[in-house]
Image (tube, helix red, strand yellow):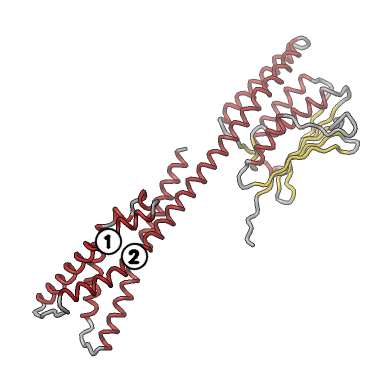
Amino acid sequence: MVGYQEFDVSREREQRRIGNVSLIAGAILFWALMVAVAVQDYRRHGGQEWWEPVFWEISSALVGSFIFYLQLPLLLDQNLLQTPRLWFARLLRYLPLVCIGFVILTFSLRHAVYAFLGRSYSHDPWLSLFIYESIKLSIFVGLFYVVVFGVQSYLFLLREKARAEKAFQLFQQAQLQNLSQQLQPHFLFNALNTISSLMYSDIKAADTALNRLAQLLRHHLDAGEQSVSTVEQELTYLRAYAELMQLRFVDRVEIKWEIDAATLARPVPSLCLQLLLENTFKHTVEQRSGFCTIHIAAQIREQSLVLAVQDNLGTLSDVAGQAPKPGIGLNNLRQRLALMPGMQTSLQIQNQPQTGVRTEIVISPTVPDHA
């Protein structure tokens, strides 16, 4: 949670910085354009001192920027921005004061500078000047408000999108943790049954089984609340579980491992391999009297991770034409696989001709669509 909060704060700061830089850059470009237009117009009417139109526009820019700075709390009010009509109405309410303040401050500044230079600054009568400047300023201010509203609305949408993504990620994480917890009682029930059966036949084997169970529980506690682990971590867990089950089914089962080293760092749902092997013991080893060979494989196939557990005795259905019903554990695992972010996943269980049942998990990175 702390990581999410720090990331959200930094992202929100970055978005605000981008928004402020955009507004400042836009204002600079606008006033640069205004200066260029004023200089051209001044030259066209026979003006000789180019600094005058530059100073006029700079004085307007300084006063306008100062007025907009005073309006920043209102311009950036997030509550008002969610109600555009109220936001614009509140700003337009102050427009007459903005026009009066702009004309007084701008032309006072111009008169002061000209007086300092020992010159006089002439302009139209005050009433005509105020009407002209107010109309021009109102158009400019209206456009400026629209731009500010657009930028702030866009940033608001980005923040809401980030919050929605965070909420969805947390929801997925909660789902994964909840589904993972469903496996624990099921596993403990089977493990304790194994130890219970050994207590009547082989005390030494039961003691070994208890030690293996302790290792499994310690491994599970070390894993914490992680809903996703790596193939290497899962294999460590799985080997202890396999040894525990082999102690129960002595001389009835053999386990062969085919593990590609390139798979060890790949992410997988926690306890996924244990569930597959547990199903094989439950539906094949316990139900068949013959000797069972179980192949456990982890391989890379065309950039996809393939995890497989296959036995040589099992069948999906004992009744012809009757489709097997997936158990709670497999339904659980399918949901957890579907919730893995950025991955395409599948879980398939198939009868292999004369070789038993093969359960296969395929996890592939999602390929971005650039079309």
The C terminus appears in which quarter of the rendering? bottom right
- Residue 255 higher or lower than 37, as above or below: above
- The residue lying toward the viewer, choosing from 114 and 154, is 154
**Left or right placement of residue 4 versus residue 363 in this view:** left
> Whole-percent x and y of residue 321?
89, 34
| N-term mark: 2 or 1 | 1
**Mark 1 packing: few (<14 Cα in 10 Å), some, or many (20+)?**
some
The kind of residue on which mark 2 rests is Phe
> Whole-percent x and y of residue 14?
41, 53
- The residue lying toward the viewer, choosing from 273 and 334, is 334
The kind of residue on which mark 1 rests is Phe
**Mark 2 packing: few (<14 Cα in 10 Å), some, or many (20+)?**
some
Kindly report the distance in space between the C-alpha atoms of the residues bearing marks 2 and 1. Answer: 10 Å
> Whole-percent x and y of residue 47?
22, 87
- Residue 253 higher or lower than 171, as above or below: above
**Left or right placement of residue 52 versus residue 299 in this view:** left
Q: Please, what secondary structure does the residue beneath circle 2 have?
A: helix
**Left or right placement of residue 308 versus residue 178 in this view:** right
> Whole-percent x and y of residue 73?
29, 53
Residue contact between numbered discs 2 and 1, judged by CB atoms under 8 Å? yes
Determine the residue positioned at 17% across, 79% down.
124
User: For mark 1, what is the residue?
Assistant: 68
Determine the residue positioned at 46% across, 49% down.
160
Q: On residue 127, which mark appears?
A: none
**Left or right placement of residue 67 versus residue 360 in this view:** left
Determine the residue positioned at 69% across, 43% down.
263
Residue 227, quarter of picture: top right
User: For mark 2, what is the residue?
Assistant: 144
